[in-house]
Image: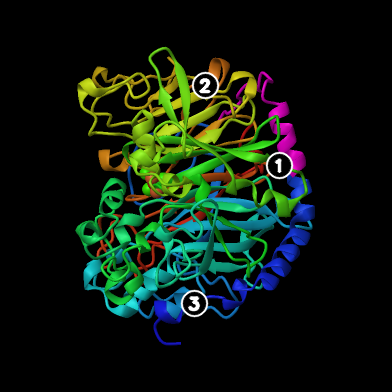
Amino acid sequence: MSSLDVDDLPVPREHRSTLFREILERRIARRTFLKGSALAGAQSTLLGQALASGMASSLSFKELPHGLDDTLHVPEGYTWQVVLAWGDPLFGDAPAFDPYRQTPEAQARQFGYNNDFLAWLPLPGAPHSSESGLLAVNHEYASSAMMHPGTPDPFGLSREQVDIEIQAHGLSVIEVFRQAGVWKTNIASGYNRRITPLTGMRFSGPARGHRRLRTAFSPEGVESMGTFGNCAGQVTPWGTVLTAEENVQFYFMGEARLTDEIRSYKRFGMHGSDVALSAWGMFHEHWNLDLHPQAGMHAGWIVEIDPYDPHSVPVKRTALGRCKHEGCDVVINPDGRVVVYMGDDQAFEYIYRFVSKHRYRPGDSEHNRTLLDEGELSVAEFTEGGALIWHPLVWGQGACTRANGFSSQADVVIDLRKAADLAGATPMDRPEEIKVNPITGHVFAILTNNVMREPLSDDPANPRGFNRHGHILEFIAPVGDHTAPEFTWEIFILAGDPKSPMDQARYHPDISEQGWFSCPDNGTFDRSGHLWIATDGFGKQGVADGIWVSGTQGSHRARSRHFLRAPRGAEICSPCFTPDQKTMFCSVQHPGEGSSFDTPSTRWPDFDVTKPPRPAVLAVVHKMDRALDG
Ligand code: FEO
Ligand code: CA
Ligand code: CA
Ligand code: CA
């Protein structure tokens, strides 16, 4: 195959046929029925536990000191291994990784670059196994200077190199198993899949078929090409994967200001060539707004993927709105409705919530896959008095009217930020991950930092001007009702150095020397309700990014402890546990960032002079094979 072209994409024409689609969906429904019922059991206990008092933390590892060097560290008694790194084969026919002879065709069969979100998914025959499962992994972006010999600038790449980078984006799905204590990949598995910016997808929800989504690629505005900028995500209770499209504005060239969408693109920060960080548009006209002025509207969505069917067509769920989606979390409310929490990661952007119209039905996969297409979007306002008010973003209500330029709910979801501005939402300090505590049902929002906030423009929920270190908020739904119009909220942690009066940090009073951190970015809860927090930006202050873990209740609340330290240049993303909590997977993203292929600041994890540093998925275990949450 010669280099790939947008115009001769492998778009499955068949899926336009209703007949084919029906057969496909019936097949998926059959396949996920068993898996769906297994997951439903686990989920229904979640809210049952919501009012439980929670377990006391018994985390007892010896904390790591702050520091920065070229390798990765875990506490004494723990060990780590690389499960998968950039370029590793995902299929039996994939060539071995050779960075000096890389091709787009090879990359299409190998693990992609800059892995971020990780999802653990049980295999259909073994819903409770912690020894084998699927990993679905986001590949957020490419780093030209770190990927290609000669350290090229993104705009100095050959077409072949651009196509390598396109194929290094998207997602990987791969079967993994643990044998004699070692995690391995099964490259013969029929589940393995690469999803890329060229994979055919479809739209659903209120914007599907809307004129503003019509492009040469999809004249009816119902199909979309691929996904990219995939940051975090979540597994749904019905066993699909949600992946969030974040920094999509860096991919489009051309003059956004000359399109009819000038206002909309401006509000999104999509300024075409003025902000493009990739040269895809030089070789592939889809990413050129001069030629395809609506193409930018195809990006910035939450995409739902069936990881169990490598032929399934991913769906962009427009009801969840279009922004720089960091990630999302999904809970089933006590009344059965599905609630999704989402952050828009940019300084002064907002926190959103979606409540499904219909109820979750355990085991009914066909029905559950429609839940994210109809419902109520809302945006958060935080008041002085400790209230969190959810303002509906529903066409015809409030400011979502024709007078304000919204002619339907399609306009509301496409111009989500504008709707939120008019609703009076609170501008936040870069909302990244939002996660629900499985023990208390409280919602934790991680805000990474915002140095653009002026000292006097602080507000109760973003209480520090020049917020260099970020913070974590906790939201409490009244009597566990995640659909309520009003919650209460409080501050969980104000990050930074507790010894520095300038930082105005806030933790448990007994925080240790190394227990404090900066720039919390993403995180997850283990089954005992500890929050595992991954940072992104501490490295730029001379202390390696890594993972800190904190209790959330009682005497361990906000007493974070330093568990893992990243190699130079890297951030850690998406801690993720096997059901028995004995393995924690996480992503080591962009090791060596800021240096180059030719003279890297680390060669982690291979430390081989013929290889650059490689982003990788890590497995961390206790040497005695103990659960990590105890
Ligand atoms: Fe992809 Fe906001 O981190
Ligand atoms: Ca970040
Ligand atoms: Ca992130
Ligand atoms: Ca990041």
Residue 358 placement, left or right of 600: right
Q: In the displayed structure, would residue 626 be above or below residue 411?
A: above
Mark 3 neighbour density, 10 Å: few (under 14) some (14–19) many (20 or more): few
Q: Amino acid at mark 3?
A: Ala
Residue found at the far bottom of this picture:
1
Q: Secondary structure at mark 3?
A: loop
Residue 67 placement, left or right of 522: left
Task: Tell me the distance, in whole angstroms, between the alpha carbons under discs 2 and 3.
Answer: 54 Å
Task: Residue 286: tell me if it is visible.
Answer: yes
Q: x, y percentage for residue 349? A: 34, 37
Query: Could you say which disc has been placed on residue 486 in the image?
Result: 2
Task: Tell me the distance, in whole angstroms, between the alpha carbons under discs 2 and 1.
Answer: 23 Å
Mark 1 neighbour density, 10 Å: few (under 14) some (14–19) many (20 or more): many
Residue 121 placement, left or right of 82: right
Mark 2 neighbour density, 10 Å: few (under 14) some (14–19) many (20 or more): some
Work out which quarter of the rendered image holds the C terminus and state it. top right
Mark closer to the chain start, 3 or 1? 3
Residue found at the far front of this picture:
403
Is the C-beta separation of discs 2 and 3 under 8 Å?
no
| Near-viewer residue (279 or 53) | 279
Pointer 1: what residue?
A: 360
Q: Amino acid at mark 1?
A: Tyr
Mark 1 within 8 Å of ligand 3, using the beta carbon? no
